[in-house]
Image: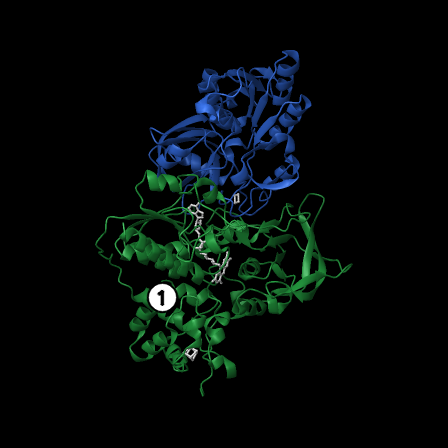
Amino acid sequence: MNKIDRVKVREQDPKIRATNFEEVCLGYDREEALLEASRCLNCKRPRCVGACPVHIDIPGFIHALINEGEAAAATIISKDSSLPSVCGRVCPQETQCEGSCVLGIKSEPVAIGKLERYVGDWKIQHASQEPEHIERNGKKVAIIGSGPAGLACASDLAKWGYEVKVFEALHQLGGVLVYGIPEFRLPKEKIVAKEIEAVKRLGVEFVNDVIVGRTTTIDHLLDEEGFDAVFVGSGAGLPRFMGIEGENLNGVFSANEFLTRVNLMHAYDDRYDTPVFQAKKVVVVGGGNVAMDAVRTAKRLGAESVIVYRRSETELPARREEVHHAKEEGIEFRMLTNPVRVLGDEKGWVRGIECVEMELGEPDESGRRSPIEKKGSNFEIECDAVIMALGTSPNPLIKTTTKGLDTNRKGCLVADESGATTRPRVFAGGDAVTGAATVILAMGAGRRAAQAIHTSLQSE
Amino acid sequence: MFKIVSKRQLSPAITEMKVLAPRVAESALPGQFVIVRTDEFGERIPLTICDYDPEAGTVTIVTQTIGNSTAKINQLNEGDYFLDFAGPLGQPSDLVELFSSENGKRKTESGPRVLFVAGGVGTAPVYPQAKYLHDHGITPDVIIGAKTADLFTYVEEMKKVSNVYLCTDDGSAGFHGMVPALMEDLLVRQGKKYDHCVIIGPMIMMKFATQKAKEHNLPAVVSLNALMVDGTGMCGACRVTVGGKTRFTCVEGPEFDGWQVDFDEAMRRHSMYRNNPKNDPHTHPCTCLP
Ligand SMILES: Cc1cc2nc3c(=O)[nH]c(=O)nc-3n(C[C@H](O)[C@H](O)[C@H](O)COP(=O)(O)OP(=O)(O)OC[C@H]3O[C@@H](n4cnc5c(N)ncnc54)[C@H](O)[C@@H]3O)c2cc1C
Ligand code: SF4
Ligand code: FES
């Protein structure tokens, strides 16, 4: 078996990084990447590939990196993924490719994510800056939303000759990649903006400040503006609250609001006008990636920061690396704790949060053990801000303004495997269909829909 | 980029701009708003749509300087550009619905008898609604309140489409007194009857005008100027309590049943960033100050 240990990736020192917004993980250099790549056994039946949601040829790209170099590796990845720099950074590898890597049985799995990131970053640095000349086929497709789903769908269609226009509600492109995931995990200028430039070089046109359903409608795009098909990649942006007492006190925010102020509006930077609440102690409710991002952002803004989660640590849905990083940065974790109300002072500002202790009962239908309240165990945590990171659901705007577009009980658009919705010529994918999920799934859905759009428009 | 095709100073601190935004102009209805950004460092600022012209592709906004961000807007001149101009956002005014049945004909024979109550720069967003009614054959009454006579805006425009009643806090023009007192005067002393009233202005004025309307059993719609970030339902910064339920102003509003609004909470939330180092009462400048 393999004798080399998994190559450690260089990171910013926890004490220093907890005070800045620079990227935490510094990534592999060439030498480190090649050493780590040499650990891969090039399995005949690679378990990692089966566990990758888009089935990237993982041993293929790793061995191309060793034998032929970065460009060849990048080409192999690009067959299945259009955002390797992003996915290498934010995919939950421990439950996907790396979680199934055969080396993980006896020692540590190959650092597939870090290698993917290395190859993706190399590609960004070495990409040609020239626009590509692609013969146009005379057909037009409108894409709603510029998140991973929209970007992936747009770039495939553009490569095949379609005239593609992306309509984005916000003033920045990238969806959650710019407004949600913080700079210290996913650099905006260095990575996200570069991925978008690559899509622009394919001839895709982007139009900001268009809220489909308000500024224009899908019916208008199809009937009046001459689009042959529409792809809806509008995400799941609607924040949930708990519905407990005190949630509208001054100092209670959704994670989306807090992160949008900091990431999209740069509130942490004095040159920008948008303010963010200056808290001394912040309690973040939730246990997913969004909760980790919010709590680590609060820490970087100078607040003492605490996670409150109703299940136990093993159930935390966040990427393991983020939990680990959060702990290193001095975030306090209060597990098996559930808020019952937010406490306010006489002027209506948050002064604390009343919680109750929980214990784990029988597994529920999702297989997770459901938390049960311990009667009478109520206690208070003093704080001056509370951030709710309880999940999000799709915005009903598009559904309510488009004829014949069905949604399910949870407000998600109904679409089949290929992305076809209940309305002819309208396709959808990503969080808008699945509810809040992952970048890689959104990207995969965008590409599948591009294929379906291509097939249906070609046959006309 | 969205070009400012004309600019008019309505008072020293209040300007009116027509902005070229064809998609917005084509879709806008009375009661809706836009979100603008002046430059890369600017906030996303909600502004009520004061008028729109689908043929010319322009949207009219009125802004009062109350902080750094609104000052940035008012420093822009004809020929300059907004970096962002997104909309129309929010629900159209209920009044629009009154006429949406049967090809634009109103539902009731005689009515509705509508009273508008406008305070400060709230006058500007009242104008398209009054005009909309006028265009549909109804001449509403409009109360316009201001601290002092110099601060009136849109009076001449308004007179063309409605019966205007002015009041000032200092008595320098029109009725001497605040808006609720003039409402009382119309409703009691002059014995006027209304089916519906729409109140747009500073939060505190809307609170007291709504109380007055309720005293007289008059249904009142208010347009809330909550703090906002995205304006599309993504953040919840704009949440308000209406009838005991949390609502997002940017998607479910900005107009709500005034009787049901928790104004004290709305005012408290509105002051959230008052003491922030960036101290910018990022607000709905159209309707924020008296
Ligand atoms: C804080 C945070 C952290 C996360 N961390 C991770 C992680 O570590 N790993 C991971 O895999 N996933 C993570 N996710 C989830 C992941 O980001 C999403 O699953 C993914 O971005 C979904 O992509 P999408 O293209 O479907 O939607 P989005 O990225 O949400 O993009 C949708 C876009 O559509 C726009 N839009 C919406 N409505 C309209 C409209 N009506 N008209 C025009 N435009 C519209 C929106 O403004 C947005 O830009 C995280 C999410 C958040 C919020
Ligand atoms: S399972 Fe692990 S060792 Fe096998 S091919 Fe995949 S990465 Fe390489
Ligand atoms: S302003 Fe963000 S949800 Fe209303």
- Residue A138, placed above or below residue B61: below
Residue A408 location (% of width, % of height): 51, 50
Query: Is A326 in front, or is A80?
Result: A80
Q: Is residue A379 visible?
A: yes
Residue A76 is drawn in which quadrant?
bottom left
- Helix or strand or loop: what does disc 1 sit on? loop
Residue B192 point in image, percent of width and height = 61, 14
Rendered image quadrant of residue A331:
bottom right
Relative depth, front residue between B65 and A24: A24
A418 relative position to A390: left or right: left
Residue at 44%, 74% in the rendered image: A48
Tell which of A129 and A213 is nearer to you.
Answer: A213
Chain B drawn colour = blue
Q: How many marks?
A: 1
> Residue A46 or B76: which is nearer the viewer?
A46
Quarter of the image with the N terminus of chain B is top left
Kind of residue indicated by mark 1: Asp
For mark 1, what is the residue? Answer: A80
Q: What sort of colour scheme is used for the picture? A: by chain
Q: Is residue A30 above or below residue B254?
A: below
Quadrant where the image shows the C terminus of chain B: top right
Image location (x, y in percent) of residue B128 = 46, 25
Q: Residue furthest right?
A: A376
Q: Position of residue B181 (x, y in %)?
A: 64, 19
Indicate the quadrant where residue B194 lies. Answer: top right
Task: Chain A: give its colour.
Answer: green
User: Could you tell me which residue is drawn at 54 percent across and 15 percent down?
Assistant: B110
Where is B257 relative to A399, above or below? above
